[in-house]
Structures are given as C-alpha cells and as structure tokens.
Image (cartoon, grey):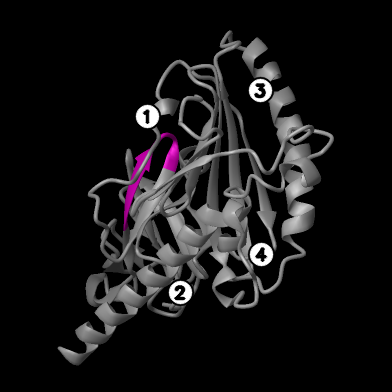
Amino acid sequence: MNKGMDIPDGWWAIAESSEVGTKPLGIERFGIDLVLWRKGKELVVMSDTCPHRSAKLSLGEIKGDKIACPFHGFEFDSCGSCTFVPETKQSAVNLKAPTFVAIERGGMIFVRLGEAAEPAPPWFEELEGNYSYRTMTDVWDTHVTRSVENQLDYAHLPFVHRNTIGGGTDPSRPVTFELTDQGIKMFTDAHKDTKTFFHLKFNNIWMLSILPGRLCQFLAFVPVNDKQTKLYLRAYQTFCTIPLLSDLVNLIMMQQNRYILNQDKHVVLSQKPLCVLDADDEKLYPSDKGIAHFREYWRTSLEAKAKSQQTATSNC
C-alpha cells in the first residue's frame, strides 16, 4: 500500500456517513486509495487495492458481509482477510487488504492513523441538539495545513471579507487564545466573556460558535493528498427546523457560505509553498498566535511519529 502523506497520527475526519450506502465508495485520503463499505450497520474502511493484482475493490460489489474484487472475484471480509478465491474454492490466508479503525460521530466518518491518545474521535458538544443543517463540499488545490490556518486567522476578515462577514472588523481588537495539546480556541474578546469563538480540535475539525444554541458553523479539513484538501462545511441552525421549510433556509445559508468560502479560496490558493512546514520565510505576528501553535503541534507530532517508527524498525 502507498505510504501516503506525512501527517500526525490520531483521529481524522475523512467523509460523511451519508456518502456510504449499499455500494462500495472509493475515495483518496492521505494520498492513499481507500474503499468504504458497510457490513450491515458496521462501517468498513480498507485499502482500495486488491492484494492479488492491484485492481480497485471499490469497482466490485458487496456480497453478503464480504466485498468482492471485480477482477477475479476474490472476496474479503471486514478485517481485510481473503475468505474465498473462486479459482481454488478456498480462502487465501496470505492475502490481506489493510484496514483502518473507523468510528462515526456527528454524521462524520473518522479513521485512526497510528495510535491515538483518545479512544474515540473528537466532537463538539455545542452541536448536540435540535439543529438543522445542510452540507456543502469543495476541493481546494492546496495542502491541508493551509486550509486549516485560514480558519485560525481572524486578522484577514476586514480585507478578504470586507463586503461580507468582515466589514468594520478591527484586526487590532483584543482576543483570547486557549492553546492545548488537543486544539486551539479563540474568543473574540480579551476576557472570554463573549459566546462567540472558534475552536479547532486536532486533527481536522473546526467550529465557529456565532449564536450558542442557535447558529454554529462546522468545517472538516480532509486531506486528499499533498496537493488537495476536501472541505466539508455545515451551517447548524435552530431558527427553522420545520421539514421542507428548513431545507430552503439551509440552502440559502449554504449559498451564502459558498460565496464567503470562495473569497478565502481565492487567496489561500495563492499561498506557496503548499505545506506550512516548508514556509520558513514567513514572519508571524501576534494575531498568528493560533497559527504558531498549530505549526508547533504538527512539527512535534511528526517528530514523535518519526522517532516511534525508527524505534520500531530498530527493534525488528
């Protein structure tokens, strides 16, 4: 299997639960081809490469509680083991497709890379409730780190979004950051008195609390590969939860969000190098406190990961 991207271990949101139905779903994540399918209600995430002749399993079909390769009909169970070879009418214990630990939470699919400090993926308790929402997606041709940092940057609002959400915003206004090993939280005043804040939970989910209990924004920054990131954006609202009418309200909100997100996209895609860890010439300012913490998290996580891999190799 392709090694994929060099990214921190832990939990990563990779897709929405609604995207996986009765047929196999083939997607690229972390520079790796994955296939997602369901064994009854159980979600399965595995390498989208048949270990026999490298055909895509996602082009095959679900046969009971197995996925069958479209090339020669080899069948694999939810653990990735080949349980049936049509040619021999037997299983093949030496053939195994790598699988990933996967958990669904908040309508999102999370997979675990390496070891995770927490047994379950992160989520936002603020989004638990009688909310209505609609999801929009977009693919940005940049590294996931650039996409994340854009949502940690409040000083760009009066410039990039001068005719939308940033009009009249003062980039010198006092703010408060909470920086931890689990994420980054920023309040829009100096004393955390406001209920307006954004919160990034590592590795890749973000929430903006605008009107608590009434209006929140959610983003998942999903790494496709080193040069592409897929964004999942939701606007959670309780203004209107009546069926059909709420669909219209959510649709209008998504159209507004798409316009605002495209304002960001225009600028972010101009940033080079793509990965922020290669941006050695950039000079950060006080408003970049969250960004500095994010970069340090990535550096230390990758260093720890490399050290762990080196130790494992030396012990073989």
Which is in the foreground here, disc 4 or disc 3?
Answer: 4
Per the image, the residue denoted by label 1 is 125
Per the image, the residue denoted by label 4 is 142
Of callouts 2 and 3, the N-terminal one: 2
Q: Label 4 is placed on what type of residue?
A: Thr
Per the image, the residue denoted by label 2 is 6
Query: How crowded is the residue under tag 1: few (<14 C-alpha within 10 Å), some, or many (20+)?
Result: few
Of callouts 1 and 4, the N-terminal one: 1
Of the numbered discs in the image, which one, if any, rests on residue 250?
A: 3
In 3D space, how far apart are the residues under numbered discs 2 and 1 (Cα atoms)?
30 Å
In 3D space, how far apart are the residues under numbered discs 4 and 2 (Cα atoms)?
15 Å
Query: How crowded is the residue under tag 3: few (<14 C-alpha within 10 Å), some, or many (20+)?
Result: many
Query: How crowded is the residue under tag 4: few (<14 C-alpha within 10 Å), some, or many (20+)?
Result: many
For residue 182, say whether it is visible: yes
Q: How many marks?
A: 4
Please give left or right for residue 191 compared with residue 253 in the image. left
Name the magenta segment's main secondary structure.
strand
Coordinates of residue 24 in the picture (x, y in percent) = 47, 52
Coordinates of residue 295 in the picture (x, y in percent) = 49, 65
In 3D space, how far apart are the residues under numbered discs 1 and 4 (Cα atoms)?
30 Å
Of callouts 3 and 1, the N-terminal one: 1
**What kind of element bears circle 4?**
loop
